[in-house]
Amino acid sequence: MPIDEAAALAAEPRSGEITWDHKDVQLYHLGIGAGVPATDPDELRYTLESRLHVLPSFATVAGAGAPGVISGLSMPGVEVDLARVLHGGQTLRINRPLPAEGRATATSRVAAVYDKGTAAILVLRTDVADADGPLWTSDAQIFLRGEGGWGGDRGPSTRLAPPTGEPDRVVERPIREDQALLYRLCGDWNPMHADPDFAKSAGFERPILHGLCTYGMALKAVVDTQLDGDVTRVRAYSTRFAGVVFPGETLRIRMWRQDDAVRVCVSVVERDDAPVLADTIVEHS
């Protein structure tokens, strides 16, 4: 069996130094669609180094995402085919605002392994801290098709009751044809997002957009429209990846305000609102 649950959970954490600077932050922001219109003062906060604010979802790619998801898939007890790998969900907990440049230690481990019958889920946890203390914790839920069935723990349900009533805000965000190619430069080199033949071998008609790109686009929409553009108000952000997005499509992002959170649903306009992000919540101050 490719996954040895006991070995994966017992494996020593992997630690490594990560660094980033304003160019990495700017590239990430461009990769999630920032900078349109290019001279808009609100967009210049994401693209101009003299005004740069860091969207908290940058944490998912800081240091080129290493040690991260791909590294986690080579942990002891884990041996999988990348064509069977999907990002099932993502959670970020932010301790303090992310600096535009930094040097930190990232420590990753397999925090949980769940048996879903026809698939397995790995929870890869990364804690990041710099000289001033903890910065963020990232949990990536990795869905491994065809790797379940050993009779292990099925894990907790992460489904939330759907938001009620009409959304407080709805925005649409177009995805460029080359957006996945640009986003790859942030560190996720899985060929599923660029190589048509590899994408077909994984069951997709063509390369798909990174789930974390959609994740970043949705958070930017929330910050821009619900949090007065203030990235420092974000405390936590979680989602379940419910479907794929193809470059060239359009995201419809629905938002419901709560006391200290924003509920979000994201779908694809061109495919009759096919769901993309579900069980999504941004906690804020």
Image (cartoon, helix red, strand yellow):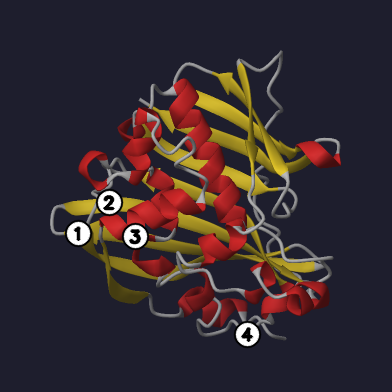
User: In the depicted view, which residue is nearer to us: 134 or 275?
Assistant: 275
Residue type, label 2: Leu
Q: Is residue 27 above or below residue 238?
A: below
Q: What residue would you read off at disc 4?
A: 79
Whether label 4 touches label 2, CB < 8 Å: no
Mark 3 surroundings within 10 Å by alpha-carbon count, few (fewer than 14), some (14 through 19), many (20 or more): many
User: In the depicted view, which residue is nearer to us: 203 or 121?
Assistant: 203
Mark 2 surroundings within 10 Å by alpha-carbon count, few (fewer than 14), some (14 through 19), many (20 or more): many
Whether label 2 touches label 1, CB < 8 Å: yes
Q: Is residue 59 something one can see in this rendering?
A: no
Name the disc covering residue 135, or none.
2
Image quadrant where residue 267 sits: top right
Give me the C-alpha separation between circle 1 and circle 4.
Answer: 31 Å
Q: Secondary structure at mark 4?
A: loop
Mark 4 or mark 3: whose residue is earlier in sequence: 3
Residue type, label 3: Asp
Q: Secondary structure at mark 3?
A: helix
Residue type, label 1: Asp
